[in-house]
Amino acid sequence: MDKRTTTVRMPEELAEKADVIARGRGISVNALMLEALEAEIERVRHDEEFMTRLRELTERDKEILDRLAE
């Protein structure tokens, strides 16, 4: 699997909480963040309002790209 490096800046208090939770679970903060991101992606996939808004944005972007290609 290809990987991408991303820097995440977060408030110190949140970073401390993430560190404690990760250590308590015996995983890295990176693994904790990946799990949280995967859970959020799964959550929004089942959010009909979000998916409708995403489809509308995608269609708008496609229309803009089509005009640029003319």
Image (tube, rainbow, N blue to C red):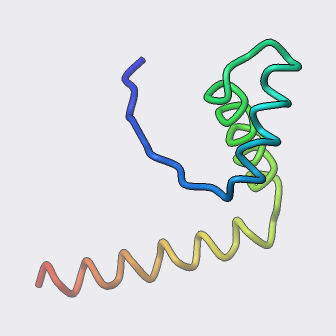
For the residue pair 49 and 22, the one nearer the viewer reads as 22
Instruction: Look at 76% across and 43% down and name the residue there.
Output: 42
Left or right of 25? Residue 27 is left
Q: In this view, does 10 lie above or below 39?
A: below
For the residue pair 7 and 2, the one nearer the viewer reads as 7
Q: Is residue 59 above or below residue 47?
A: below
Where residue 24 sits: x, y (%)?
A: 88, 20
Outermost residue toward the left in this view = 70
> Which quadrant is the C terminus positioned in?
bottom left
Where residue 12 sits: x, y (%)?
A: 69, 53
> Which quadrant is the N terminus positioned in?
top left
Q: In this view, does 2 lie above or below 43?
A: above
Left or right of 70? Residue 45 is right
Instruction: Look at 43% across and 43% down and name the residue there.
Output: 6
Left or right of 62? Residue 46 is right
Where residue 21 sits: x, y (%)?
A: 85, 30
For the residue pair 42 and 14, the one nearer the viewer reads as 14
Q: In this view, does 23 lie above or below 64?
A: above
Left or right of 68? Residue 38 is right
Outermost residue toward the top in this view = 26
For the residue pair 15 and 68, the one nearer the viewer reads as 15
Labels in figure, total: 0
Instruction: Look at 67% across and 29% down and name the residue there.
Output: 29
